[in-house]
Image (cartoon, rainbow, N blue to C red):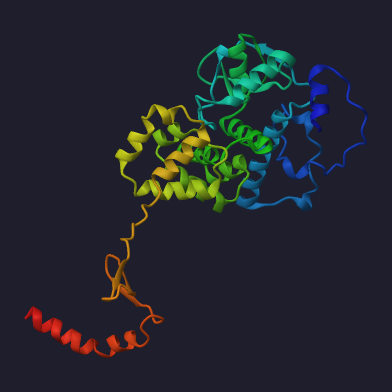
C-alpha cells in the first residue's frame, strides 16, 4: 500500500480502485491465520505444496507472522482509527532504539513543521502492559516529543501488540526510514539480546543477517554507556569508524575519556563533533622521531647523516661529496667492532 493510500485510509478518503491482488501476493509473509485482528489484510493461505514443515518451517512462519503484523501496524492499514492522546500518557518502549541528544537540531525543525502543517503521520502505541490508562510507544518518539513541546495532543494508532510485535514494528519503521545511526542500531540490537529475545527475532527486527548482527552487538558491548551518552547518535560516523573507536576504547586510559567528556567545550559541540573529538583523543600517539644529526668534515662538508630511533641508528654517506667513503668504512667494520669491544673490556 502506498503512503498516499495509507493516509487516504486514515483520514476517510476513498482509495482509488485497484486490480484484485493475486492470491499468493502476501502468502509468504503470513503464518497460519488464527489471529483475527489483521485478518482483513491477509489473503488466503498458500497452497499446501509451498508450505515448509518441521521446526525450521514453524520458526519461519512465526517470524513471518510477526513481520506481517508489524507491517500492518507500520503502514496503518485501512480502517485503523486515529485518536488524540495526551503525550504525557505515552511512555517509551521497553527497548530503547534511540540515543538521546541534548543538542538535537532536527527536533526544532520537526516542531516547526508540525506547528505549521500539523502532524501528518500518526504514531503507533500499545496499551501499557503494566500501567492502566497509559501507553507504550512502538514508533514516533520524536513526533510525540514535538507534541509535548507544542503542548498539544499527539495523533496515534492504538494496537494491542506483544513484546515481539512491538520491537519488530520499531525495527521495521527504523529500517524503512533509515534514520537510525549505526551506533543506535548497534545498541538496539544489544538491548534486544539482553532482554532475552532470540537471535531470529532480532534479525527480523533489525533486517540484518546473523553475521552483521554479531558485529553490531560486539561494537555495542565495547562502547560504555556513558561514552555513548556523551557522544550521542553521531549519524555521520558510520560502521568503520565506530568499529575503530570501539577498538581504541579497549586500550584507552579512562582518565582521558572522563576529562574530555566533562569539558564544557566538548558538551557544547554537536553530536558528530563530539564523536570526532573522542575519536581524535584516543588516536594512537605518533612516535616523534629525533632530529637527524649531520656529520661534517674539517672543511664543513656534510658528508654523513645520522638518524636514530629507539632500537637502531642509520648512517648515510653522501657519495657525491666523498665517493668511496662508505665502502671504506664498511671494510673496516671488523676493526672498529674489535676496538669497541676491547675498549669495554
Can you name the residue that lies furthest to the front here?
Answer: 299
Residue at figure coordinates x 37%, y 86% from the top left: 323
Q: Nearer the viewer, residue 199 or 104?
A: 104
**Residue 262, located in which quarter of the rendered image?**
top left
Q: Position of residue 147 (x, y in %)?
A: 62, 14
On the image, the x and y values in percent for residue 22 come to 87, 42
Question: Quick check: 330 left or right of 184?
Answer: left
Which residue is drawn at the image coordinates 92% and 27% (left, top)? 16
Residue lying furthest bottom = 331
> Where does residue 144 sit, x and y in percent of width and height?
61, 19
**Position of 237 compared to 71: left or right?**
left
Residue 156, image quadrant: top right
Q: Residue drawn 33% across and 40% down? A: 256
The quadrant of the image that shows the N terminus is top right
The residue sitting at 27% across, 65% down in the picture is 310
**Vertical order, 269 against 313 (above or below):** above
Q: Is residue 159 visible?
A: no
Across and down, in percent, residue 21 comes to 88, 38
Q: Nearer the viewer, residue 251 or 201?
A: 251
In the current view of this chain or complex, which residue is farthest to the top? 151
**Res. 332 in view:** yes
Residue at the farthest left position: 345
Please tell me whether residue 105 is drawn above or below residue 219 in the rendered image.
above
Amino acid at each position: 500500500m502506498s503512503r498516499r493510500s495509507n493516509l487516504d485510509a486514515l483520514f476517510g478518503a476513498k482509495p482509488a480502485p485497484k486490480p484484485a491482488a493475486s492470491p499468493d501476493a502476501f502468502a509468504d509473509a503470513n503464518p497460519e491465520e488464527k489471529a483475527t485482528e489483521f485478518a482483513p489484510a491477509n489473503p488466503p493461505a498458500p497452497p499446501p505444496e509451498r508450505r515448509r514443515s518441521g521446526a525450521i518451517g514453524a520458526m519461519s512462519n512465526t517470524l513471518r507472522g510477526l513481520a506481517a503484523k508489524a507491517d500492518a501496524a507500520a503502514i496503518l492499514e485501512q480502517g485503523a482509527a486515529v485518536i488524540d492522546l495526551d503525550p504525557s500518557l505515552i511512555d517509551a518502549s521497553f527497548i530503547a532504539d534511540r540515543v538521546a541528544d541534548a543538542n538535537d537540531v532536527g527536533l526544532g525543525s520537526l516542531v516547526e513543521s508540525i506547528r505549521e502543517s500539523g502532524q501528518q503521520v500518526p504514531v503507533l502505541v500499545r496499551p501499557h502492559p503494566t500501567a492502566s490508562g497509559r501507553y507504550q510507544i512502538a514508533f514516533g518518539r520524536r513526533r510525540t516529543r514535538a507534541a509535548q513541546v507544542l503542548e498539544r495532543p499527539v495523533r496515534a494508532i492504538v494496537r494491542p501488540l506483544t513484546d515481539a510485535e512491538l520491537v519488530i514494528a520499531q525495527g521495521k519503521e527504523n529500517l524503512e526510514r533509515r534514520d537510525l545511526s549505526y551506533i543506535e542500531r548497534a545498541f538496539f540490537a544489544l538491548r534486544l539480546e539482553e532482554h532475552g529475545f532470540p537471535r531470529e527475532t532480532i534479525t527480523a527486527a533489525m533486517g540484518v543477517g546473523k553475521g552483521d548482527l554479531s558485529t553490531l552487538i560486539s561494537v555495542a558491548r565495547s562502547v560504555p554507556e556513558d561514552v555513548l551518552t556523551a557522544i550521542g547518535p553521531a549519524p555521520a560516523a558510520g560502521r568503520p569508524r565506530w568499529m575503530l573507536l570501539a577498538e581504541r576504547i579497549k586500550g584507552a586510559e579512562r582518565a582521558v575519556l572522563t576529562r574530555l567528556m566533562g569539558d564544557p567545550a566538548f558538551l557544547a559541540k554537536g553530536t558528530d563533533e563530539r564523536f570526532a573529538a573522542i575519536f581524535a583523543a584516543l588516536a594512537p600517539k605518533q612516535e616523534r622521531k629525533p632530529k637527524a644529526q649531520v656529520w661534517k668534515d674539517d672543511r664543513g662538508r656534510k658528508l654523513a647523516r645520522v638518524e636514530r630511533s629507539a632500537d637502531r641508528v642509520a648512517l648515510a654517506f653522501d657519495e657525491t661529496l666523498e665517493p668511496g667513503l662508505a665502502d671504506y668504512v664498511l671494510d673496516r667494520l671488523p676493526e672498529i667492532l674489535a676496538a669497541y669491544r676491547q675498549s669495554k673490556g
